[in-house]
Structures are given as C-alpha cells and as structure tokens.
Image (spheres, rainbow, N blue to C red):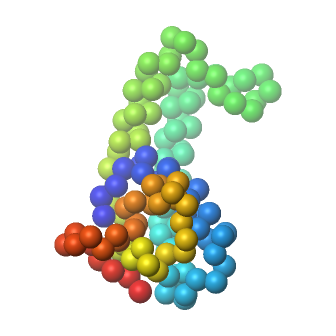
Amino acid sequence: MKLTLNDLVLAQPSLKSVVEGNERMSGGIAYHIARVIRLVDTELRDYHTARQALLKQFGTLSDDKRQWLISPGNHTGFAEEMDRLHSTEIELDVKQISKDKLPNLTVAEALALWWLIDDEQGNDNNEHSE
C-alpha cells in the first residue's frame, strides 16, 4: 500500500489509541494491528531522524535545550523541506481491515486511519484481513 510519511505521522497516535481503548480484540485483529504499529513505528524512526537533521540545519536549540527555534529567515526553507519530507511516499505491506472488525473508532481515528479501513464499498483494491 502506497502512503506518505505524513499519513503515518497522523495515524500513529490513532493506532495506539485503538489499542489502549480495546484490550479485548480478537486475536487475528489484535495481531494485525500490532503488526501495523510495528511497521509504522519503523518507518517513523527514519522520519524522526530526518526531521531532527532539518531542525539542526534550520534551527537552534533553546537555552533550556527543550525546543528548537526556527528564525524567521529560515521558516520558508524549513517549511519547504518538511513538506518534502511529509510527502515522501513509502510502501507499507499491510492489508486493510474490515470496518466491522475494528473497534468503535472516533471520527478522528477513522480520518487518520482511512488507509487501513476497508469500507466495503466495492473497491477492488481492498484486501480483507481476519
């Protein structure tokens, strides 16, 4: 499945929220979601490394060393590089999960996990996981 790094950045908190809020999922779905989380976390490790490099390139660490500060002169360059990073396409080897097999999702979770949910609307590209 082709996604962008931004898709994964937005999905990560929702994936963890789904797990925390539903301790009693069926074994197959629990395994599938755990696998998706592992794959997403792996991809995002590289993303965070690249993001840190951009922060170092365009910013300075605050005096208390708790946050990066981007000077006004560097905002445009930093934003352009972050946009490029966020739009980087990656291939994630996951199958969609039927919406009926997922726990009750909030609207925010459903929006963040659009790529993982098979809405059973007749899309021939969807694969079902049990």
Which residue shows up at 51% across the image and 31% down it? 54
In the image shown, does 32 or 106 lie closer to the viewer?
106
The answer to whether residue 67 is above or below residue 129 is: above
Q: Is residue 22 above or below residue 1?
A: below
The reply, left or right, for residue 81 in relation to residue 9 is left
Residue 21 seen anywhere in this rendered image of the structure: yes
* Quadrant housing residue 79: top left
Residue 122, horizontal then vertical, whole percent: 22, 72
**What's the residue at 35%, 71% (across, down)?**
118
Give the residue furthest to the top: 73
The residue sitting at 67% across, 69% down in the picture is 20
Q: Give the number of callouts.
A: 0
In the rendered image, is residue 34 in sight? no
**Is residue 48 shown left or right of residue 67?**
left
Q: Quadrant of the C terminus?
A: bottom left
Q: Residue furthest right?
A: 64
Q: Horizontal and vertical percent for residue 4? A: 36, 50
Q: Position of residue 124 (x, y in %)?
A: 19, 72
Task: State which quarter of the image contains the N terminus.
Answer: bottom left
In front of the other: 121 or 84: 121
